[in-house]
Amino acid sequence: MKQTMLQEKYPIFVAEIAKTETTYNTVDSLVAYYKGKIAENPKVHFIDVFDHYAHTSKIGGPIVEGMKAAVDIIFCFGFAIPTPQMLAVRPRSIGIADMGDKYVISFMEAPMQPANEAMEAWTLALRDA
């Protein structure tokens, strides 16, 4: 997993996982995996799954060549609301892109280290499955 800056301003974590490195063979199975991880933690709340690929296709927007599917799993780690401005960085999402021979999984760095640690651990564990 690598940490990088997207468009020189968004700190993100990205993992490229070859389909041969995991037993999860569909985007739906990856969504179910993450939903299970979210459900295991009583301080994390699942919100929804957004089919970004379907939405972009419907409006005729450009999609990178080779992409087969793209979804965002939306959830919240909101342990506290220390300021009203914290709402600007919540909820969280993990993006899953099916690029044919691999999955590209990404998420923006959270302002709370336990959230980053959990999302990174969940993602890295996909290689062991």
Image (cartoon, rainbow, N blue to C red):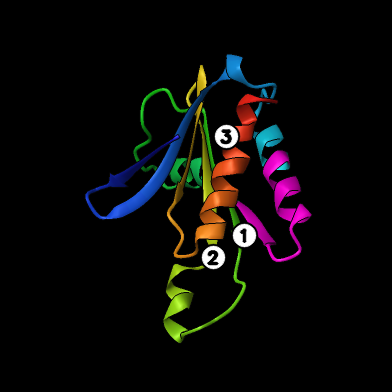
Residue drawn at (76%, 46%) of the image: 36
Q: Are marks 3 and 2 in contact (CB under 8 Å)?
A: no
Judged by depth in the image, the label closer to the viewer, 3 or 2, is: 3
Say which residue label 3 marks.
Answer: 124
Could you tell me which quadrant the N terminus lies in? top left
**SS type, badge 2:** loop
Image vertical order of residue 16 relative to residue 75, above or below: above
Say which residue label 2 marks.
Answer: 91
Between disc 1 and disc 2, whose residue precedes? Answer: 1
Amino acid type, label 3: Leu
| Residue 95 or residue 1, whichever sits in front | 1
The image position of residue 119, as x and y in percent, is 57, 48
Amino acid type, label 2: Pro
What is the spatial separation of the Cα atoms under label 1 and label 2, in whole angstroms? 6 Å
Q: Quadrant of residue 125?
A: top right
Residue drawn at (74%, 58%) of the image: 41
Q: Quadrant of residue 29?
A: top right
Say which residue label 1 marks.
Answer: 75
Amino acid type, label 1: Phe
Image vertical order of residue 111 relative to residue 72, above or below: below
The range drawn in magenta is 33-49
Q: Tell me, for residue 49, which label it has, or none.
A: none
Near mark 1 (Cα within 10 A), the count class, few <14, some 14-19 or many ≥20, is some
Judge left or right: residue 76 versus residue 90: right
Image vertical order of residue 23 relative to residue 122, above or below: above
